[in-house]
Image (spheres, rainbow, N blue to C red):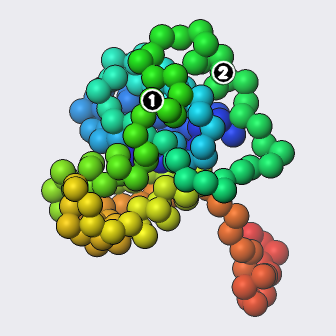
Amino acid sequence: IIDTDMSVDVDDVVAVCAAHAMADRGEAEILGIVHDVGWPAAIGAVSVLNHWYGRDDIPIGAYKGSGLTLAGQPPLTYVDSLVQHFPSPVRSSAEVPDALDVYRKALAASPPASVVISSVGLMTNLEVLLRSGPDAHSPLTGHELVAEKVTLLAVMAGEYPSSHSMGRPECNAC
C-alpha cells in the first residue's frame, strides 16, 4: 500500500512508478494507493500513473478529513499537467472513497504479516487508520489490523529531532 502526498514534490511520482516497475517484474502487488494531503486533483495524478501502467483496477482513496492545510505549499504544476493532459478514469478526490476505507479493506483481505506500507508524505491516513474501530471490512481495530497484517512500515517524511535536541551531545562527524 502506498500512502502518498503527491503534489508537494515529485518523489511521490518516483515511488508510484517504482512500485509499478516492481509489479511488472512480479516482485510486488500494489494493494492500494492512498493520498494523504487533501488536494482534490492529486488523486487524479495517481490515477493517471496507474492508467499509464494499465492498472486502473488498483483501489485508490483520498484523505477526506477536515482541518488539513499546508499553508505556503501549493501543489506543484505537474499535478494539474498530468490530470489535464493524460487519460485516466479518476480526476479528483470526489470520485474515490476515503483513504481509511481503502486501507481497511486491503488489510482485512490480506494474509497475516504480508503487507508493506510505504508512506511517502504526511501520516494523516496512518493516524486515522490506527485510531479506527471495527467496520464492515474487519472486526479488528485499526491498531489490531496493522499489528496483524503489516510486516513493514517504511516512512520517508517528517521532521525528526536532532541528537542535540534529544539531550545527547552533538556529533560533529555526522
Which residue matches tag 1?
95
From the image, which quarter does the C terminus lie in?
bottom right
In the image, taking residue 100 as reference, residue 111 lies left or right, namely left
Q: Position of residue 139 (x, y in %)?
A: 20, 67
Specify whether residue 145 is in view: yes
The one nearer the camera, 16 or 85, is 85
In the image, taking residue 78 as reference, residue 120 lies left or right, namely left
Tag 1: amino acid:
Glu
Q: Residue at x 50, y 38 (%)?
A: 15
Q: Assess disc 2: are there few (<14), some (14-19) or many (≥20) residues with their C-alpha within 10 Å of its C-alpha.
A: some
Tag 2: amino acid:
Asp
The one nearer the camera, 31 or 129, is 129
Q: Secondary structure at mark 1?
A: helix
Q: Nearer the viewer, mark 1 or mark 2?
A: 1
Q: In the rendered structure, which disc, 1 or 2, sits on the residue that comes first in sequence? A: 2
Specify whether residue 9 is in view: no
Q: Position of residue 156 (x, y in %)?
A: 57, 54
Q: Position of residue 57 (x, y in %)?
A: 29, 27
In the drawing, what numbered circle is on residue 80? 2
